[in-house]
Image: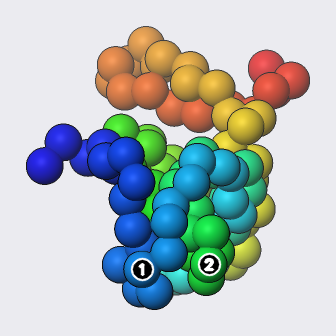
Amino acid sequence: MTGELARNSRCPLCGGRLRPGVATIPFVLPDTVVLIKDVPAEICHSCHEPYMVGKMTDKITNLLNQLRAFRAEVSIVSYSELQPVPTTTTGVRAFATVGES
């Protein structure tokens, strides 16, 4: 399994065809709710359920961990406005929105 969707992939929920697109995906975590807009995903043509693949899932997981550190009850971010910013102390990439300093 490569984390990539095969051509003509089918939705595991309804069997509809998956097509590339962007989606708004809510994440309900124990201490916060995060809504991420403009996430690249494969979206079912029939039931409209979005599916993220491999590398995208890793990026979203890192983003969710960073957002949880803010301890906000609700966060709304746009994936298309996020850019990786390397940190000098840890070598870990952080994310900032376009236009932030």
Above or below, 99 against 50 in this view is above
Position of the C terminus by quadrant: top right
Q: From the top left corner, tell me how far across and down residue 95 is, in percent.
A: 59, 33
In percent of the image, x 68 and y 59: which residue is there?
23
In percent of the image, x 42 and y 80: which residue is there?
15
Quick check: can you spot residue 88?
Answer: yes
Front-most of residues 7 and 70? 7
Above or below, 5 against 50 in this view is above
Quick check: can you spot residue 69?
Answer: no
Query: Are there few (<14), some (14-19), or many (20+) residues within 10 Å of tag 2?
Result: few
For marks 1 and 2, give the CA distance: 8 Å
Using the rendered view, name the quadrant where residue 89 is placed.
top left
Residue 46 got which mark? 2
Q: Secondary structure at mark 2?
A: loop
Type of amino acid under label 1: Gly
Type of amino acid under label 2: Ser
Q: From the top left corner, tell me how far across and down residue 38 is, in percent.
A: 72, 50
Q: Dot 1 corresponds to which residue?
A: 15
Of all residues shown, which one is farthest toward the left? 1
> In the visual, does 33 lie left or right of 16?
right
In percent of the image, x 47 and y 19: which residue is there?
87
Above or below, 93 against 25 in this view is above
Q: Earlier in the sequence, mark 1 or mark 2?
A: 1
